[in-house]
Amino acid sequence: MTTAKDLFIIAMNPEHSVGQGDLSLALAGAELIDLAGSGAVVVEGDRIMPGEPAAPEDRLMRAAADGLVREAPYERVEDWLWRRGEDLAATYQAALEEDGELTQKRTGRLSFGSDRVQPADTPARSRAAGRWKENEPVLTALASAVGIGDGQADEEPGFDDETATIVVAAVHDSLMELEAVRQRRSIENAAFANVWRGP
């Protein structure tokens, strides 16, 4: 399993309510940190430089590695988050369902009630729960960024390497940018509705 999959499983806890866009950005950050940890990329400043050729066993990580920009001036971390993060939460949901890591939980009394996914009782779920219980710094920081946890990661966590610090900071910046876009759209929509409603 990967940090991104662990994060997705934690986010699926019914106690948490995480937006798809927010989670997608955090998942892209988790992938980048894992790629750096494996030596597939090197983060220098705000740029992602290719490292050693890698073919990760995990197919989602392999897709992430295959999508790296391998020519100068290379890609900025924040640009990677937005590009790789597009619909990434939905991609992870589909992959984990296919692998049997998620199951559909029917809600409502009627047989045609809405479906909700939940983590299946698998070793992957236990591993994610274990990392979460141990307050593993990267997982905790990324989860906190999307509103999961008790807020302790609002404080700057101590990471063992600079890459995690750079990526987590970029995730926070991207999430703030996404929230600003949402607020702007909300204001525009409200103004548009008022125009149609008239005096």
Image (cartoon, rainbow, N blue to C red):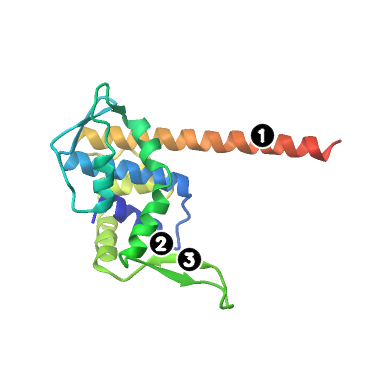
- SS at mark 1 in the image: helix
Nearer the observer, disc 2 or disc 3? 3
Few, some or many C-alpha atoms within 10 Å of disc 1 (few <14, some 14-19, many ≥20)?
few
> Is residue 150 or residue 111 the one in the foreground?
111
Q: Position of residue 151 (x, y in %)?
A: 40, 47
Question: Which residue occupies 38% across, 37% down?
Answer: 83
- SS at mark 2 in the image: loop
Question: Where on the picture, by quarter, is residue 170?
Answer: top left
Examine the rendered structure and indicate whether residue 137 appears above or below residue 74: below
Q: Position of residue 177 (x, y in %)?
A: 48, 33
> Is residue 113 or residue 138 the one in the foreground?
113
Q: Earlier in the sequence, mark 1 or mark 2?
A: 2
Few, some or many C-alpha atoms within 10 Å of disc 3 (few <14, some 14-19, many ≥20)?
few
Question: Which residue occupies 23% across, 34% down?
Answer: 163
Q: Position of residue 27 (x, y in %)?
A: 35, 46
Image quadrant containing the N terminus: bottom left
- SS at mark 3 in the image: strand
Question: Where on the picture, by quarter, is residue 154?
Answer: top left
Q: To which residue does mark 2 refer? A: 13
Question: Which residue occupies 33% across, 53% down?
Answer: 7
Three-letter amino acid code of the residue under disc 2: Asn
Q: Which mark is residue 116?
A: 3
Q: Position of residue 70 (x, y in %)?
A: 23, 30
Asked if the residue under mark 3 is in contact with the one under mark 1, i.e. CB atoms within 8 Å, the reply is no
Three-letter amino acid code of the residue under disc 3: Arg
Q: Earlier in the sequence, mark 1 or mark 3?
A: 3
Few, some or many C-alpha atoms within 10 Å of disc 2 (few <14, some 14-19, many ≥20)?
some
Q: Which mark is residue 188?
A: 1
**Residue ranking furthest to the right:** 199
